[in-house]
């Protein structure tokens, strides 16, 4: 059985290898990059969680619930053993205290970040000071501040629009708030997946994401599954079926130190796509819990480790 989701992604890997340009980047690692690329995932054909390598679904679900809750503190993720955001606040903590910043692949870095995260969990005052990632995704999604002092809950608004005005061309959520970019960069990251739009047709809900910066090997598989799941959740609470998730990338790149891992993944044969089951009793987007999601039929190849660029 051909898995269309893995095939879309593997095609992107091959495209970057063939057409990508060598570029420098903020982290100093170096990339092979293309500009502008689109993938489409039919959510009626299984859940787009890659099978050519195991993807960390627990982290995907918890991070998405964290965003939807409007939370921006590392503590929620750290308490649930999700460490996808650890590097940036740890580096900010070191810089803020005039401490040396070790190389991110060194034993000193690994030991230090483990101790940092443990303190985030155990020390409320420390978590308040150093676990706050600034006005990142959850803040912009749920608490966008206006110049006149109002607050916009974008997620609540788009659910209402889908229900009341499904043909609107304004069902959009933006995480890219120029006024907050510098503040986001202090302990977190300016939004990579920065804008998404919903579209209703034939009783199906589709979503298109624009991602300005795309770490294709590590980040993009995560982003695909996260927004596919969000689309399914919103479809359910709005009484619709899930349609397509459309992923559009800006600077779409492979880090130079991920190329061996890319070759390993390309050598693998895709397996059947899994199925995501969502608790049908949940009718409010903000009442989902981790236990409301069950993945069935996921039989991936082993995970492939790769260093994260900080």
Image: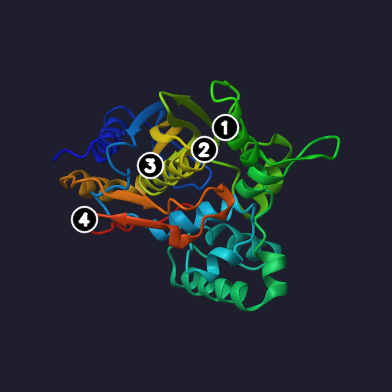
Earlier in the chain: of badge 2 and badge 1, it is 1
Residue placed farthest to the bottom in the image?
Answer: 122
Q: Quadrant of residue 20?
A: top left
Judge from the rendering whether residue 266 lies leftward or rightward of residue 80; answer left or right: left
- At horizontal 54% and vertical 25% (from top left) the residue drawn is 166
Which residue is under mark 3? 216
Q: Earlier in the sequence, mark 3 or mark 2?
A: 3
Q: Nearer the viewer, mark 3 or mark 2?
A: 2
Image quarter of residue 249: top left
Element under label 3? Answer: loop
Which one is closest to the eye, mark 4 or mark 2?
2
For residue 151, say whether it is visible: yes
Residue at image point 67% right, 60% down = 132
Q: Are marks 1 and 4 in contact (CB under 8 Å)?
A: no
**Viewed as shown, does residue 303 lie left or right of 251?**
left
3D distance between C-alphas at marks 3 and 2: 31 Å
Q: Quadrant of the N terminus?
A: top left
What residue is disc 4 on?
Answer: 301
Q: Position of residue 126 (x, y in %)?
A: 69, 72
Whether pointer 2 and pointer 1 mark residues with C-beta atoms closer than 8 Å, the reply is yes
Closer to the observer: label 4 or label 3? 4
- State the residue position of label 1: 163
Q: Find the distance from the CA under tag 3 to the CA under tag 1.
A: 34 Å
Q: Badge 4: how crowded within 10 Å, few (<14), some, or many (20+)?
A: some
Between circles 3 and 1, the one closer to the viewer is 1
């Amino acid at each position: 059985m051909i898995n269309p989701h893995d095939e879309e992604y593997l095609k992107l890997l091959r495209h970057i290898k063939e057409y990508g340009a060598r570029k420098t980047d903020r982290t100093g690692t170096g990339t092979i990059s293309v500009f502008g690329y689109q993938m489409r995932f039919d959510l009626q054909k299984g859940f787009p969680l890659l099978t050519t390598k195991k993807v960390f679904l627990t982290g995907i679900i918890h991070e998405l619930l964290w965003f939807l809750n409007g939370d921006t503190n590392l503590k929620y993720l750290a308490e649930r053993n999700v460490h996808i955001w650890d590097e940036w606040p740890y580096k900010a903590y070191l810089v803020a205290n005039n401490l040396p910043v070790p190389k991110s692949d060194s034993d000193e870095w690994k030991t230090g970040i483990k101790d940092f995260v443990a303190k985030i969990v155990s020390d409320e005052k420390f978590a308040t000071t150093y676990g706050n990632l600034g006005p990142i995704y959850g803040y912009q999604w749920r608490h966008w501040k206006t110049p006149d002092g109002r607050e916009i809950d974008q997620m609540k608004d788009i659910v209402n629009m889908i229900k009341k005005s499904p043909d609107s061309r304004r069902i959009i959520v933006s995480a890219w708030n120029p006024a907050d970019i510098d503040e986001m960069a202090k302990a977190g990251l300016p939004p990579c997946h920065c804008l998404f739009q919903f579209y209703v047709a034939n009783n199906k809900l589709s979503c298109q994401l624009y991602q300005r910066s795309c770490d294709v090997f590590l980040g993009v598989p995560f982003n695909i599954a996260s927004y596919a799941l969000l689309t399914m959740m919103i479809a359910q609470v709005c009484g619709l079926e899930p349609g397509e998730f459309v992923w559009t990338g800006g600077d779409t790149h492979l880090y130079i130190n991920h190329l061996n891992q890319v070759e390993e993944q390309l050598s693998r044969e895709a397996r059947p796509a899994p199925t995501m089951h969502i608790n049908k009793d949940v009718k409010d987007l903000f009442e989902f819990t981790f236990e409301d999601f069950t993945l069935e039929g996921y039989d991936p190849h082993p995970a492939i480790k790769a260093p994260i660029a900080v």
